[in-house]
Amino acid sequence: MANIIVVGTQWGDEGKGKVVDLLAEHADVVIRFQGGNNAGHTMVVDGEQFISHLVPSGILQGKTCVIGNGLVVDPSVLLEEIDYLTEKGIDAGPAKIRISERAHLIMPYHKAVDLARETMKGDKKIGTTGRGIGPCYEDKATRRGIRFSELLDPETFLERIEPILDDKNFYLQNYLSAAPLEKGPIVEQYAVFAERLAPYVTNVSVEIDQAVREGKQLLFEGAQGTHLDIDHGTYPFVTSSNTVAGNACCGAGIGPRAIDGVIGIVKAYTTRVGSGPFPSELFDDTGDRIQEKGAEFGATTGRRRRCGWLDTVLLENAARLNGLSSLAITKLDVLGGIEKLKICTAYQHKGKLIEHFSADLKVLAECTPVYENLPGWDEDISAVRRYEDLPENTKNYLRRIEELTETKIGIISVGPGREQTIVLENPFE
Ligand code: GDP
Ligand code: IMO
Ligand code: MG
C-alpha cells in the first residue's frame, strides 16, 4: 500500500496530467489539493485528448476524484467539465467526484479584479491566467471568502455576499475603473450551481481517512509547479497557493504520516508562461524549435510558452523543497534532433557562482547561466518502450540529470499518449 504525491518541479506544464492519469490505474482515490482552473492538465488516451482544469486527472481511469479544501473553485468551470466528461461517456457523477465543503468559491468579482489589475499593471503585469485565483485566495486569507458549505445554504450565502459585493464594487469602480457587478444575477446563478453541485459536496477529510483505513491507495495531483509556489517560487511572479508537496496534506485534510512518496515531474527542458525570471531561457532558433516541436502553448490560456534549457538549479531546489523520492522525466522525445544539448547547472552573478535558487529577483534577472554541454541524439524515441532501447546519448542525458539532482528517475515519457511511457519504478508496487 502506498500514498503518493505528484508535483511539478519547474514553472508548471511539466506533464503532471499525463503522469497522474498513468499512475491513477494503480490508485483508488486521486486528490487535487491546491490551485484552481488556472491549471490545465492534458491527458491523451487512445489518441483522444482531454484537458482538465479542476477535475483530478484520475477521472479517465474511473477513480474517485477529490477536490480538496485547498482549492479555489469556479463552479461554472467545474460544471462545464462535468458536462463535458459526461458527454464523453465518462462517469463524472457524485459517486466519482467529491468536493470539499471547505473549498473556496471563485466569484465573478474575483475574475473582474484579476483582469482589471493586470490591465492596470501594463508592462509590470504578472501574466496571470485571469481566472480570479489570486483575488479568491486573497479573500480566503482576509476571511472574506465564501465556501461550498455557505453556497449550499441560500440564507447564509446572501448574508455573506451583500457586504462583500459592496466592498468589491467600490474597489472595482473607484480604483480599477472597472464596471460594478449586480447582486441579483450572481445570486440567481449561484443558486443554480448550488442545486447542481450539492450532491458532490462533502467532508472530504473524513472520506479520505476512511479510504486510508480501508487500505486504499491515494494519489495527490499537484497543480502549477514548485517555482510558482507562493513562498518558494519567483515571488511575486508566482501563483497564490503553495504548490509544494508539503501542502498536499493541508489542502486535503490529512496528516503527513499517510504519505509514502513524492514524484517530481521534470520536463526535459524548461518552459514558463507569464512573466518573471527564467535564467536558462532561449531567445534563438533552438528555443523556437523546442517551442514548435513540443507544441508549447498554454493548455488554459493558449499563450505561447517561453522555452529554455533544462535547469538543475531549479531541480535541486525542487528536490529539497518537496522531498522528492523520484523523478518522472517528460517530453524527452522533443529534444531529438538537437545536435548539442545544454544543462544549466549553476548561475554566475557578479563574479560569484550561485548553486542554490535565489529569492532575489534582481539576482535571477541579472545572472548568467553556467552550462554543461552534452551530445544530443537524432533518433525519434517516441516509439521506444524499454530503457535499453534508448540511444546511448539519451541515457547519458538521463544519467546526468540523476547525478545533478541526486534523485533517481522512475518514469520516462516519450510522447503525450498514456502508452508512450517507460516505467522503471512503479511507486505503488
Ligand atoms: P501539466 O499542466 O503539467 O499537466 O502539463 P500540460 O498538460 O499543461 O502540458 C504538457 C503538454 O505536453 C501536454 O500537451 C501533453 O499532452 C504533452 N506531453 C506530456 N508528456 C509528453 C511527452 O513525453 N512528449 C510529448 N511530446 N508531449 C508530452
Ligand atoms: P498547470 O497546473 C503554468 C502561472 C500564470 C502566471 C502565474 C500566476 O497547468 O501546470 P494565476 O492565474 O495562478 O494567478 O497566475 O502562474 N500559472 C501557470 N503556469 N501552468 C500552470 O498550471 C499555471 N497556473 C498558473 O501563467 O504566470
Ligand atoms: Mg498545464
Image (cartoon, rainbow, N blue to C red):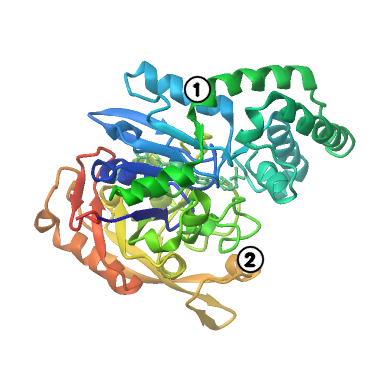
Quarter of the picture holding the N terminus: bottom left
Extreme-bottom residue of the structure = 351
Residue 356 visible in this rendered orientation of the protein: yes
x and y, in percent, of residue 223 in the image: 47, 47
Q: Residues within 10 Å of mark 1 (few under 14, many from 20)?
A: few
Query: Circle 1 sits on which residue?
Result: 80
* Depth order, front residue of 408/379: 408
Residue 229 image point, x, y percent: 55, 57
Answer with left or right where residue 168 lies relative to residue 14: right
Residue at position x 54%, y 20% from top? Answer: 196
**Residue 108, relative to residue 231: is it above or below?**
above
Q: Gap between marks 1 and 2, in whole Å?
A: 38 Å
Ligand 2 within 8 Å, label 1 CB: no
Badge 1 amino acid: Glu
In the rendered image, the quadrant that contains the C terminus is bottom left
| Tag 1 secondary structure | helix
- Work out whether mark 1 precedes mark 2 in sequence or the reverse, and give the earlier one: 1
Please say whether residue 130 is visible from this viewpoint. Answer: no
Give whichever of 39, 120 is nearer the camera: 39
Examine the image and state in which quarter residue 352 appears.
Answer: bottom right
